[in-house]
Structure formats: C-alpha cells, structure tokens
Image (cartoon, helix red, strand yellow):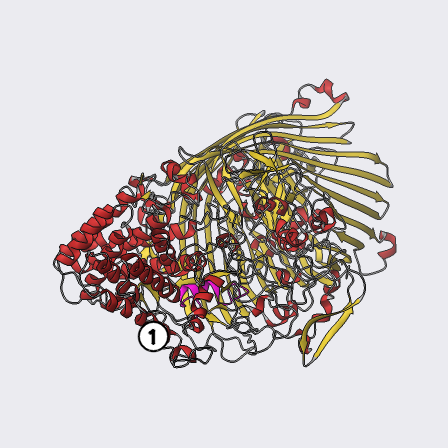
Amino acid sequence: QDRTISGTVIDKATNTGLPGVSVSVKGLTGVGTATDVNGGYTLSVPAGSNTLEFRFIGYKTIERTIGTESNVSVTMDTDAQQLGEVVVTAMGVERQERGLGYATTSVKSEEITKGRTSSPMNALQGKVAGMNVSSASGSPGASTKVILRGYSSITGNNNPLYVIDGIPMNNAATNLNEGTNTVNRTQDFGNRANDINPDDIESISILKGASATALYGSRAASGVIIITTKKGRVSEKIGVDFTTSATFSRPLRLPQTQQVFGQGWNGHFASEENGSWGPMLDGKDRLWGNIVNNSQQIKPFSAQKDNLKDFYETGKSYINTIALSGGSEKTSFYASYGNVSENGVVPTDADSYKRNTLALRGSTRGKKITISSNLNYVRKDAKAVTTGQGGEGQTLFQEMIQIPVDHSIVDYKDLNNPFNTLDNFYTPYAQNPYWSLTQNGNDFDENRIFGGVDLSYNFTDWLTATLRGGGDVAHGVIQDWIAKGTYTPGSPNSSNTDIPGRVTERNRFSRDLDANLILTANNNINEDLRLTTLVGYNVNERYARNGTAFTNNLTIPNFYNLANTSVPVEASTATSLRRLYGVYGQADLNFRDYLFLTLVARNDWSSTLPTSDNSFFYPGINGSFVFTDVFTNLKGVMNFGKVRAAWGKTGNDASPYLVNSVFVPGTVGLGFGNLNFPLSGVSAYERSNQIGNLSLAPEITREFEFGGNFEFLDSRIKSDISFYNRSTKGQILPVPIALSSGYSTLVSNLGEISNKGIELGLTVTPIRTDDFNWDIRYTFSNNRNKVEELTEGLEEITIQSIYGINFVATVGEPLGVFKGPGYTYSPDGKLIVSAAGYPVPTTEKEIYGNSQPDFMMGLSNEFNYKNINFSFLFDYRKGGLMYSYTQRLTQFVGNTTNTLYNDRLPFVIPNSVVQNADGTFSENVNPVDVGSIVDYWNPQSNAPIEREHLFSRTYLKLREATLGYTLPADLISKTPFASVNISLVGRNLFLITPKENNIIDPETTTFGNDLSGEFGEFAGGPSVRSVGASLRVSF
Amino acid sequence: CGDDFLDVNTDPNNPLTAPAELVFPAGVASTASVVGGNFAILGGIWSQVWTQNNGSNQYKTYDAYNLRPTDFQNSWGELYAGALNDYKYVKEEADAKANNNLYLMATVMEAYTYQVLTDLYDQIPFEEALQGLSNLTPKYNTGQEVYDGITARVTTALNRPTTGTSLVGENDIVFGGEMNSWKQFANTLLLKIYLRQSEARPGIAEAGVRSLYTNGANFLNTDAKVDLFVDQTGKRNPLFEQDQSAALNTNQNLKASTTMFTFLDANDDPRLEAFYIAGNAGQKALEQGAFNTPSTLVAPLSVSRARISPTAPVYLISEAESYFLQAEAVVRGWGTGDAQQLYEAGVRASYAQLVAEFSDVSSVADPILDRNGRSDSTANAKLAGVYAFPATGSTADKIKAIITQKWVALGGSKQGIEGYLERNRTNIPATSAVGRSTATGYIPGEFVYPVEGVTGNGNFAARLLTPETERTRNPNAAGAASKTITDKVWWDVN
C-alpha cells in the first residue's frame, strides 16, 4: 500500500527551505518529486520502499531510511567537491549558478567585512569584474558610486537598483544642495546603500546584464544589487557573534607643493598675497602679515613642506556589532545591534559619522504557511566638511590650498590671536581656514526604517503563493550654518564685505513602498526535464518630500535658529510621487542538470509617462550548457565547463513631472548670487525654461551577452569570462536648445549609448595542502562606451561646465568628454600668440579626452596557513581624465610644482609666432617676463592653460590587506567561546598615480554619485589610508 | 490598478499656468538683472568708468577685450528665455483679454530688451525667436530689421487705447501701473531707437524723431527704473549682489578708471565721491586695463573702488538720459524745445539721482564745497562754469557737450553700457591722441585703449560674441558667429 510522506528540505547554510531538490525513492525509477519554493515536498511512496534519496546539485546527497513516520525533513549541506553555488537571482529566486545563462557574482559576508569599512559598497572595490566602485572622499560616511558595465544614461540614473531581502531600497544621496551640477557649498552625507551594517550581510549578488534583471523592468537598466541578510540558523543554543574593530586613518594624498618660491605675486614679495608667486625662498627672516597694534610677525622665508599634512589629525573609526541568532527546524530569529563611530582626519568633529543599526529577523513555518519578516532601523548623525566654493561662507579646503608654501597653517589655529582674526588675517583674498572649520558647520540626522514581510502558502506540493510587502521610510534633517562675521572699519581687511551669517534647515522625508504577489510552480515534466515557473504582480510607490528653509542676516552671532534673523525666512517645498505596477513571469527549463533555458518577461505601467502611453514590455531569454557533463572525456583537462548566452531588455523610467511644461517662481541667476521673488511684497512666476514632453517613453536598454565558466586541474584554475554588448536608446534628456527659442531645454527621448565589454574573473590556487592554501583572484573589466547618436542638429550635450571646461556627450565619443580651449597654430604649425604674448586660444573648444577608464583590474592574494590568514588586494585603473579644481587653484596661486617651469625665468614661448595686421606671421620674440609668468599660468589671460587642470585618473591602490589569526579549537574548547579571530586590517595603504597628478586621489569627486561625478572634483578633501585591528568572537 | 492610481504626474511644486500679471514682473526682473548686473559691469569697464583691479582677477577678460563665446551666454539666455519669453506670454494673454495697458507695458519692455540685445550683438533671432517647439533653430535678423521691427511693435501698441492706471498695480515694478509714464517710456524709447540710427540711417532717424514730436509725444520726466531692492541676500540690487556681496570673496574688482576719474577730478565734480570709494591712499585711479601692474608698484587697496549700493534702483532709462536724448533731438533740429534747458535738466537730474542714492556721502549730498575745498560745486555752479552749454557753439560742439555729460550721468546710474554704445555712435568722448592716460598731454576724460587689450592698439570693442549656446545649438547662428569683438554693429559707421 502506498503511503504519503511529506516534509521539508532545509539548506544548512541559510536555514531556509531549499527549492528544487530532487526527492526520490531509492531503487525505484519514476517515483520522485522536487521540493517547492519553500523546500517542501509530498511524495507517494510505494509499500515496501523504505529509503528516500535527496539530491541537489552542489549539495551532499542524503539517503534517509523511513520508518513509520509520515513527515521526513532533512537538512542538506553543501558539498565542496561539487560545483555550482546557489546564488540569489531576480525576485529572490535562488538558483544553482550552473543553471544561469548570464554572468553573476556573489560576494560572501567574509569578503564584505574583512577590511572593516563601515560602507558595504566600499568593501566590494576591486572584487567584482564589471563593477566600478569608487568612494567620493576619505570623509567618514562619504557616498560611494557603483556603476555596473558603464554608463548608459546621460542625465538619468546610472546607479543600480538595490534590493534587500526582496524589497527595493531607497539609495538617495544626501547633500545640502541636492543638485550635482553645483560648485557651491557641497556636503556629502553619503548615499543610503551605505546604511546597511556590513556585519549583517550574508551575501551580495550582482546582476549586471539585462537578461538577469529584466524581471525588474523599468528600474533595472543599470543592473541590480541583491543584498541578502543573515538569518537565524538551526542550533541548540542561541548563538552570539560579537565583532569589534578600531581603525585609524591619515590622509592618503595631499597636494604636493613647490618648495622653491614663497609668498608674493608677479615675482615680488607681497605680505597680503595668498599665493607663492614671490621671490625665491632664502631662509632669511622676514616680516609677514599685517601690522597689528604696531607689531608684525617674523619668520624665516623658507618652505613649510608639511604645512598641509600637519593640519590633519588621525582619524578614528570604531565599528561594533553584536548579533544573536538561533532557530529550530520551524522557526528562526536573528537580532543584531551595530554601532559605528567615526571621526575623520580633519581636526574637530567637523567630519564625523555615527551610525546605529538595529536588525530583527524571524521566520516560522507551519504546515502550509511560512511567514518571515525583517525589520531594520538606522540612525545616522553626521557632520561633513563643506567642499566646493564658498558662496557666503568660505570652505575649508579652498582656503587651505591657497596658502603660501612658506606659511605654517597650524599657526593660524588660535582665532583669538590678533594676527589670526578676520580683521587681521594676512590676506584679504582668503579667510583663515580655522574660521570656516570651527565657526561654520552642519549637522545631519536621519532615522530610517526598512524591511518587509513574506507570507507563503503551499497550495500543493508544486504550487506556492508568496505575498511580499515592504518599505523603506526615512526622515532626515540637515542644519547648515555660516557664522556671521564683521570686519572692523579701518582694519587691514576692512575692504571685505561683512558675512551676514546664514542658517539653513532641510527636512527630507522619503517613503518607498513595494508589494509583490508571486506564484511559483515546480513541475517535473519527466525525469529528465524539470520546469520551474513563476508569475508575479508588483506595485511600487515612491514618495519624497523636501522642505528647505533658510535665513540670512543673523542677529545674535553663533546662535543658529531660523528665528534669529532680521529678515524674513525663505522656505520652499518639493514633493515627488511616482507609481508603477507590473506583471512578470519567468520559466526555467532544466534538462538533466546540464542544459538550461530561462524565459523572462515583464510589463510595466508607470505614472511618470504620459497616461495615454505608459505601458512597456521587457522580455529576456538566456540559456546555459554544462558541456563537461555531456562530453565527459574532457574531464581530464577541464573538470567543469559551461557556456552561456543571454539577451534581454530593461528600462530606465522617466523622472516625475517631465511631461508638462510649467511656470516656476520668478528667479534670476546672476554671475554670483541670485535675485529671487518675492521682492518687496511682489511675487512673480515665469515660464519654466524647460519644455515638457507629452510623448515621453522610458530609456530602453537591450543587451546581449555570452560567456562561460571553465575550470581546470581539479578546479585549481577557475575562469569566468563574459562579453556583452549593450545599447540604450531613447535617452531621456533635457536636450539643450538655442535660448533664442525662448527655452533652454526640451525633454526628449533621443540618441543611443552603447557599452561593449569584456569581464574576466580568474581564480588560481597554486598551492593547496592540508596546512597551506594560496588563492589568487584576478578581475579584469574593459568597457567601451560610445555615444552612438544624439539627434539631428544637436552636436553635443553639456553635462557639466566649470570655468573654461565643458564635460559633454558628443557623438562618436565615449560619454563624458572634456572640452576646453586649445592652442592655435599658423599654417606651418607654429603656436600663435597674441600681442600680449600669450597663446591665442581656439574659438571653439577642443576635445582634451574623456573620463572613461581603458580598463580596470583587481588582484588579490590570499594565504591560509593553519589558523593564519593573510590577504591583500590591489586595485588598478588605467586611463580616463579628471578635472581638478584643487589643481586649478593650487596652480593659480603658484603652489603647484608645474609652476616651476623654466625656474620661473623669462621665456619666449617656444616655436611661437604673432599674426601681423596683413595676416602673415612673424616669429614671436616677446618673452613672458617675470611679472607675467603668473598670468601665463592663469586661464584668464592664457585660456589654453586650462588643460593643466585635468590629469589622468590612472591609479594603483593597495586597497586592502589583512592578517588574521583564528585561535585553534583545542585552545578555546575550555572557554565559553566557539571561535575567536583577531585580525590586523589596512585599507588604501598606498596610492600610485602618474607623475602629472601629485595633487589628489583620482577617485575623489564633489559632484555626486552618478555621471556628473565622473567630471572630477571642486576643492574636495583628501582620501585616507587606514590601519587597525578587529576581533570576532562567537559563543 | 486603474488609471487613477497612475494619474499622479501633475507637478505639485509648480503651477501649469500663471496669470499674466504675475509673469510680467518676472520678465522685468530678468531684463533689469542683466542690464543692471552683468551688462552694468561690462558697460562700466568699457565706458572707462571702472577698470579691473590689479590685485584680483574677475573681469580681466572684459577689460582686455579678451571675451570668449561662453562669456555673457547666461545673460543672453536670461534675456531670451527669462525676459522676452515672458513678455511674449504676457502679450498673448493681454491680447486675449483685450488688456491694452498690459499689452503696451509688455511691448515696451520687449522692445527695450531687444534693443539692448541687437545693440550688443547686431544680428539676433527676432522674427522667428521665442517659438519654442515650433522652431528650435530660429533664423537671425539683421540689426536694421530688429530696429524696424521693434519700432513698429511699440508704435502699434501705443496706438491702442489705454486707461489711466493699469489693473496690474503693484505688479508693475517700474511705474506702479501709471499708464502715462508707460507712454512716456514708450516715446522715449522710440526717441532713443531713432537717435541711435542718426549716423547709419539719418533719414529714418530724422523722420522718426519728427513724427514723435508732430504727434505731441511726451517723454520721460521721471526715471524708468526698477526700485524694490532690499539689503538682503537674493533681494539686492543685482550689480551689488553679483560684485559686492559676500558671494564673491572680494569687493575690490572694480576700480576707478583714470579716464572717468580725471574728468570728474579736473572739473572738481563732487559726483566723484558718489562714483568711487576712496582707497587707503585717498581718491586715486588706475589706468584703464592696467590690471597687471605689480601690487608692489600700486598697492591694490590704495586705489579707489566702485561705489555700489545694495538698494539702488536699476535704471532702464533714467530721467537724465531722457533729457539728454531730447536735447540732442532739438540740437539736430528734429525736435522742438530749448536744448540748453534740456541739457541742464539732464545734469541736474544726474546730481539729484546720486544725492538720493548716496545721501550718506556728504560731499555729494551737500556739494557746496568741492572735494578739494574750493568754490561752489553744485550743479548750478558747474552749469554756469565748466559744464556750461555751448549755446553759441556749433551743432557738433553742442552734441559733444550733451554726449559727454550723458556719459558721466550714465556712469553714475550704472548704465555704462548705454554710455559705451553712445560713444561708439558719436565717438564722444574722443580717443586720446597720446595713447595713455598717464602720458603728458592727456586730456582728462578721453578714452585710451586698455593697457592689456588683446585686439591691437586702438581696436576698441564693438560688440559681444554670439554665445556658445547659439553656436552649438542653432545652425542659423553661423553668420553672426563669424563676427569678432571689433566688428562694428550696423549703426556704428564712424
């Protein structure tokens, strides 16, 4: 007589149900089933049979004798000998890696937490082929830019979609200015993907291609990063994991200054100049600065080599996490508290970041119903050093880099010293940096809750419904203040304008909600062919509201409240609401575990598109073939081989409110400052300069990729190679139009951007013995980006324009081309100079180069000897240009080393001619004299010198190095500890750049974490190197 | 989910439409911000009221005639997309509602703005401009065509019947809704447009001026100005906000130019104190364009700098300018009236304007003694002395007196750009024969080629360069874009 046996198969690693496990009766063919999405199964077992066999690729096969019980549940463990890990794919579907038709990389918790960075994204630097991760600065809590397979959108979003435990996450970056095209007072408070406590992460899956992400439709064009958090594990007692680390940082790269010439201008000493265009440093005592109370300071006229370095202090970072977890076969829980406390290298707590995270997760499984939930709370308190240029209050780094090389900056520290006050500081052209450091400031405080609930119901052994709902709600407040400052009439700097003081408060609220209903079915069509299908329905809403209020003319100094003013407070609000719903489906066909085919499709309806035409369809297909399973005679050489191919289509939705043309409050941008209505009680509205578009569509990305995984010599050599060709059409762009049309931009879908590339991952294990293991991991990515077309009549689109440099998209070139004034030449190739003796610039700007890397590489070595682990990771980037305002200003004031050209002696510009009135040319004999050398380096008089403000982004970094020791088991067996690990960690230990860049870390940006960030930096702060130690204890 | 669920794409932050009465002041503010901001800086430098400081950098390219196509592209954009596009909307709405008052106001502001543009750029988009999606690459019209176009538009608007005060009321940030003043402004603007053509198309100029007088036109006897600025960030006079507020880290960029300085100084003109704030070495000027003078030779803080008030109005056409325009029309025999009286009214109006703005500067407010402690320095005293009208002189002498005083008055009201355009038309003040304002034999007030000029000695700037935004986005800009900074505009035939 047949009897019905049911039960659940649990994955030992995650303590969750394992779907797709083949359950059969030993010795009987044709009797078997597969587990459902939750790992459950029901099987009719013929009488007389008493052994069940559980088989799953990558796991150790289990044979289980059944007695009289009708419920047989087993826990399966991975089999290191077997190949093909389980990875989390779109919509949280776990699949064997061997079955995937596209490239994916999964990074485990150990890799994420090793370097002890508080940012989970920074921890991925150099570790994933095709993933470009760069940190905006060395400031605590700074934002991280993550770009997968290059930029596809000129003005849209190029950040991947972050999904944490099945719920899309809000990755907004927080800056006082929000806009990324500004150079005024930028403050980087980070992006929200960095809010997650790395110690809570189980794994991160990176889905790069369109076929891999098509299930996410309109949000997936830039790839998807799927974060899976740690869950409770089956254990007899409650496990406790405690991790603590302390790391200390110093600036990694500061501008290198020339050490030959001192304070002055035009070759002369001038005590009020903020620059080093003076005479040669001679070491002799010299009076300097202003005469205050009939006295003046004296110091030797010699270089202060470390005057910038001495300003900085040692940064500190403490990261602690305690996690409790446990579970039985039916229920599990995980709870953790994480605490990050960081204070960066800038003196005072002006660069500090505190983060408290609380995570609660639990699940329980009934007969038919499984429910699990996770809840995360994050509280951040941060202060960020203002970068960019001042506006009403000066900014720290901008003031620092103009200081003459013979000054000792730390000597300015005491603001009560009469020589250091606003009135008497040595120059009227700059402000004491300690004033902006200590008198101006900001405070950012954010509370955030995100998480969700999963409810699953097993209709039958092969059909399951899952309802997954969740959200991400955050509220942040930034307060920013600029101290009131007055100049005493008659004092040396009394010609300066009083600083009225300013206080700004910005409230940022965001609420993202997401719900999915998913039906999953497992069918064994026959013994050889298995079909897994899912269909789903998704609703998404994203709402944000920003309120900003500010006031000037503070009445009581050093008191920062909006009420402390003599003028009306100005306030504005900005609300944004968008909705999306979609239906989607996926079918996976698995033939004998070596041939796989997946079909995906999604249709989206979006609120941000015109209501008449808001539906978009995103299909995809991919397949893989593990050929070594068929051609088994290959196994002598290649123990595993798989080829794969994929095609897919995804989108990048429009932003809200681009469809209609609107009126905006009256405002006029002046060269500096603005004129804003209401004015004296009169209010005004004007036509927006942007024309809306009633036929807007999403940007559509199509991508084809193919590749394979090949493993040799008993998997001691593993390779993963991908080729892709991606094309994004219908760029949503505020297309710049001639202003004589009455408007400056027209929202359009136009043009095409392509990204073609190669990604290579290689793992080699040169030595593998019982005691010693050496692993080499290498990643290589090469992405060729190209603007294929814009639209007729539009040659280029300006993304960013700072001083004489434009950052543009132009046809036939990679996205992000730098253009600036060029040199002009006579017909016989000689440089043309003007009557004033400086090169005559080209009328039209010429191309200097582009920001895209030629290639990127990561190389890590890991050594394990008994309980000792040693690893280090190099990160290399080749090529691409960046703009550096730090270079510009440092050069303008004569502090850079390139200004030592010709020892600052008079020179005739080599091979130059002047144009005569009749159009002919004659040799230029007019030298650039000592007094004019400063103007030679100044783009105001010598425009092509702008080129000197850009340099190569090439770098080599020792990104991470760790040395760890795990206490031997026999040593701790008598202690309450289950495991103890002590590590020394270092990050960004050294940086090598080409000689032309002795100014700044080429990763630095002050322009946000998207394409405009590729422009470069505007008076950004230094990056840092850090070293420290960590301790992990489990009990 | 139904369509209602997705119907959430109406911008909650900005309205889809706005009343014309609220759009008009936004347009006026755009015109005033450019004319009274960027162009006031350029005009002050080019009309040699100010020169770039030798201790800072901001306006070196202006002073050296070393402009790039990116310079002033924001001003161009603000005038087209900020001002003119709003006037166009206001005119359409006014037409639809048969509001002739508002129609005249918007037409006058539109014509005023177009004249500024065409005077500086010559060929500009006009007939095909401002059509949005219907024409993204408007064709360029010649300067003459623009002049004829704006003349016709203002004349048409003037011929429509208007009522005493406009319903716009406080939204009229020029005249508070006073329609009589708008008509005067319209007439004075026409007078200015006609007179500008006096050398290039004397026949058209004369006929135009005569028709104004024949029709009994009234001209401005008050300032056409925008006067609602307060000393608060974002609400200040645009010139002050841009050049003097804490937004820029120094307020020393604009220094007294020897050209204007010596003229006022030689004539013991008390207005000098209203033009300039003394440096730490007393009142002192820097030669035009001498911004590369080593600071060891001339300490930057020792030189007088521009006196700019955060609450001063922006003058579109000042009362003084109106009188000088009328005086010239009379002297040329095209208009009727007493040229001397009009000339003297112009000088007095200039004094009065500076007294009103800088009443805290004692020598201006009470100019009984001049700055050197000598003699009576009131306008009346000067008009009886050094500034006396050459009543018995030739037409050329009279025009020279009028344009010279107009140059000073326009300098005082920060309308240097108009002063410079008028010099290009009339060559008054003349170019110095000795080349440098520091050379022996230099006649105070005569123009010198800027020391660091890059266009070659004597080649004064004659126009602005077609902006880069037009060069790269509008193929029809090619013709205009081929012009250089020294190519004269069409009416500049001397």
What kind of secondary structure does the magenta stretch mostly adopt?
Answer: loop
Q: Amino acid at mark 1?
A: Ala
Q: Mark 1 falls on what kind of element?
A: helix
Relative horizontal placement of residue B273, taking residue A436 as reference (left or right): left
Q: Nearer the viewer, residue A642 or B42?
A: B42
Image quadrant in which the N terminus of chain A is located: top right
Q: Is residue B430 visible?
A: yes
Residue in the image at 77% along x and 21% along y: A636
Image quadrant in which the C terminus of chain A is located: bottom right
- Whole-percent x, y for residue B247 in the image: 50, 64
- Whole-percent x, y for residue A256 in the image: 73, 53
Q: Nearer the viewer, residue A713 or A21?
A: A713
Q: Chain of mark 1?
A: B
Dot 1, crowdedness within 10 Å: few (<14), some or many (≥20)? many
Residue in the image at 50% along x and 71% along y: A502
| Magenta segment | B231-252
Relative horizontal placement of residue A737, taking residue A529 as reference (left or right): left
- Whole-percent x, y for residue A603 in the image: 41, 38
